[in-house]
Amino acid sequence: MTITHLLPFYHWIKAFHVMSVIAWMAGMFYLPRLYVYHCGAAPGSALSEQFKVMERRLFKQIINPAMIATWSFGILLILTPGVIDWHAGWWHTKLLAVLLMSGFHGALSRWRRDFRDDRNRHGAKFYRIANEVPTVLMIIIVIMVIVRP
């Protein structure tokens, strides 16, 4: 199913999609790094409380809206005639990677709530490794969209 009326707006939709992705990825790269540093702060300390504020603002004011915009503009792109060759396999891989990125977004949210409630169960090493997940997924997504193997 496509919506022909979207064709004149294709370039605008694509531009806003790319801007949304950039904002989403910036937050997805930075939040796990904040968690690494937050692990070094004693629960209840002024530093821990400052990290909680930073994490909440980053998540609520940047990451969440950027993800919603990314998905919204992405769906509009899919609905634009001629954007996707539904017989090509690249978009299946891209969609899977985007779904995994959204799942990682959910994990970041859960970990943020754990820090908020002083219930963090992971160490700095865990978050350093987790910090690589959005990078790997972004590489897959970009290759699928640009190279279309």
Image: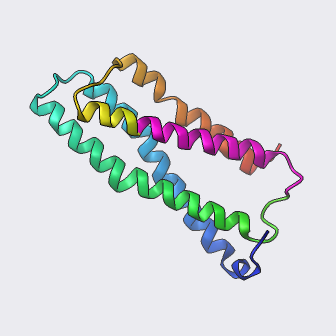
Q: Residue at x 59, y 64 (%)?
A: 73
Looking at the image, which is closer to me, 116 or 29? Answer: 116
Compared across the picture, whether 115 is left or right of 144 comes to left
Compared across the picture, whether 55 is left or right of 130 comes to left
Q: Which residue range is magenta in the image?
A: 86-108
Q: Locate the C terminus by quadrant.
A: top right
**Residue 147 seen in the current view:** no
Q: Residue at x 10, y 33 (%)?
A: 46
Q: Which secondary structure type mostly characterizes the magenta part of the structure?
A: helix
**Residue 105 seen in the current view:** yes
Residue 134: % across, % down? 53, 36
Compared across the picture, whether 121 is left or right of 102 comes to left
Total numbered circles:
0
**129 in relation to 70, above or below:** above
Residue 134: in magenta span: no
Q: Quadrant of residue 112?
A: top left
Residue 104: in magenta span: yes
Figure coloring: rainbow
Q: Residue at x 41, y 50 (%)?
A: 63
Q: Quadrant of residue 94?
A: top right
Compared across the picture, whether 81 is left or right of 31 comes to right
Q: Residue at x 77, y 45 (%)?
A: 92
Looking at the image, which is closer to me, 70 or 121? Answer: 121
Residue farthest toward the right in the current orientation of the protein: 87
**106 in relation to 84, above or below:** above
Residue 76: % across, % down? 65, 68
Q: Quadrant of residue 122?
A: top left
Residue 14: % across, % down? 63, 66
